[in-house]
Image (cartoon, rainbow, N blue to C red):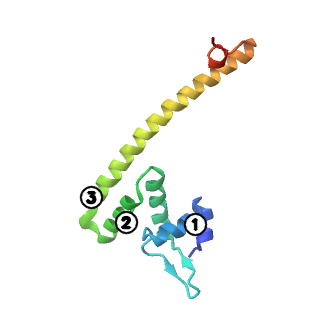
Amino acid sequence: MYTVKEVAQKMDISPHTLRFYENQGLFPHVIRNEYNVRQFSNEDLDWVRIVQALRTTGMRLSEVKRYVDLCEVGNSTMEERSKLITNQRENAEMELAKMKKKIRILKEKEYYYEDLFLKEGLDYRNPKLKG
């Protein structure tokens, strides 16, 4: 069993966020010991992983809760769960493509500046130098 602090360190998530998610019912099997301290099992760590993945790819908290609730219902909800995961992956891939395009633009700007430094030139693309 792991404490909130241990899970936070192990999973690279803040203790505050873990507690918040647990209070929202996203980790349905976390128990508390006799001192009311949350205790996470290895199975709970799997829940943390999927919740983190869903949240960091932009899924709304209410949708994550829906996914967790569907998991708790069981096998009869597999198709709906699968669709939720597929939609989220597709959304994440679209966001990744957008981010890659932005990174390409930044790299081009880096190369531009590197070239300027090598030539000790002026930055004619700087609006301040124009007109």
Label 2 close to label 3 by CB (< 8 Å): no
Determine the residue positioned at 43% across, 67% down: 26
Position of residue 2 in the picture relative to residue 78 (left or right): right
Earlier-in-chain disc, 1 versus 3:
1
Residue 63's x, y, as percent?
36, 59
Viewer-nearest of discs 2 and 1: 1
Q: Amino acid at mark 1?
A: His
Residue 37's x, y, as percent?
57, 80
Determine the residue positioned at 44% across, 50% down: 58
Quarter of the image where one finds residue 115: top right
Report which residue position mark 2 lands on: 68
User: Separation of disc 2 and disc 1 at Cα?
Assistant: 20 Å
Earlier-in-chain disc, 2 versus 1:
1
Q: Amino acid at mark 3?
A: Glu
Residue 74 or 26: which is nearer the viewer?
26
Quarter of the image where one finds residue 68: bottom left
Residue 79 or 109: which is nearer the viewer?
109
Residue 94's x, y, as percent?
40, 39
Residue 50 or 122: which is nearer the viewer?
122
- Residue 16 is labelled as 1
Residue 131's x, y, as percent?
63, 11
Determine the residue positioned at 51% across, 73% down: 41
- Residue 80 is labelled as 3
Q: Amino acid at mark 2?
A: Val
